[in-house]
């Protein structure tokens, strides 16, 4: 299939994208491609010969709000407070009393929050106003292709035709 190289992998995928597979069908959303694979599975087809591949990928960044130095400091404080708390609890495991454990956990929380606030503030100020917004990022595919090993293509196409005809 054009455009899929042997070195293109998705995060969490331990192997390269399928090469030399037959394009069985293409769908505008993942749910339709998944339904076809599920149907083929229900018919006893060897689904391990199939792959669903997202094509025409786009990076989608959804802006979630304005970022100020105060919000950056608060976000840094919140994230580092957890790390400080966990560190304090870990060190507290070796404490001689339960009171010392709680004190170390509290100190870790406070120092983590202060350190995180300073770090968040400084990091945001360092951007010089070039990124005064917060956002989330994700990948979106324009279509999803169901691919099959060439040796199983005829059987898969026959079962897919039955599926499309409602049988």
Image: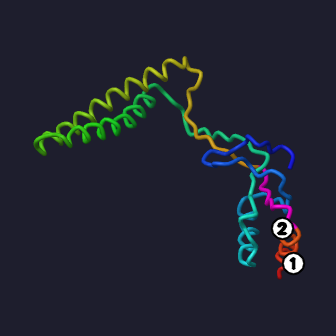
Residue 77 vs residue 90, the one in the foreground:
90
Q: Dot 2 corresponds to which residue? A: 152
**Residue farthest toward the front in the current orientation of the protein:** 151
User: Hey, which quadrant is residue 162 in on the image?
Assistant: bottom right
The relative height of residue 67 versus residue 62 in the rendered view (above or below) is above
Q: Position of residue 58 (x, y in %)?
A: 73, 42
Q: Dot 1 corresponds to which residue? A: 165
Name the secondary structure under disc 1: loop
47 to the left or right of 11: right
Residue 90 vs residue 152, the one in the foreground:
152
**Residue drawn at the location 54% of the way across and 20% of the way down:** 127
- Is label 1 in contact with label 2 (beta carbons under 8 Å)? no
Q: Position of residue 1 (x, y in %)?
A: 86, 50
**Residue drawn at the location 29% of the way across and 39% of the way down:** 85
Name the secondary structure under disc 2: helix
Q: Which residues lie in the magenta part?
A: 142-153
User: Hey, which quadrant is residue 114 in on the image?
Assistant: top left
What whole-number distance in Å separates the C-alpha atoms at marks 1 and 2?
A: 20 Å
25 to the left or right of 135: right
The relative height of residue 163 versus residue 26 in the rendered view (above or below) is below
Q: Position of residue 145 (x, y in %)?
A: 80, 57
Structural crowding at the residue carrying mark 1, measured as other residues with C-alpha within 10 Å and reported as few (<14), some (14–19) or many (≥20): few
Decide which of tag 1 and tag 2 comes sooner along the chain.
Answer: 2
The relative height of residue 11 versus residue 144 in the rendered view (above or below) is above
């Amino acid at each position: 299939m054009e455009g899929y190289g042997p070195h293109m992998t998705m995060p969490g995928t331990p192997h390269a994208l399928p090469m030399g597979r037959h394009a069985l069908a293409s769908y505008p959303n993942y749910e339709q491609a998944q339904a076809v694979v599920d149907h083929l599975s229900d018919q006893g087809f060897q689904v391990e010969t199939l792959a669903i591949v997202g094509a025409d990928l786009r990076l989608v960044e959804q802006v979630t709000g304005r970022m100020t130095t105060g919000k950056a400091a608060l976000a840094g404080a919140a994230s580092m407070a957890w790390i400080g708390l966990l560190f304090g609890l870990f060190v507290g495991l070796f404490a001689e009393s339960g009171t010392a454990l709680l004190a170390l956990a509290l100190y870790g929380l406070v120092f983590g929050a202060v350190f995180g606030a300073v770090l968040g503030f400084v990091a945001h100020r360092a951007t010089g106003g070039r990124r005064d917004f917060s956002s989330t990022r994700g990948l979106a595919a324009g279509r999803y292709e169901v691919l099959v090993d060439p040796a199983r293509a005829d059987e898969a196409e026959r079962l897919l035709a039955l599926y499309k005809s409602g049988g």
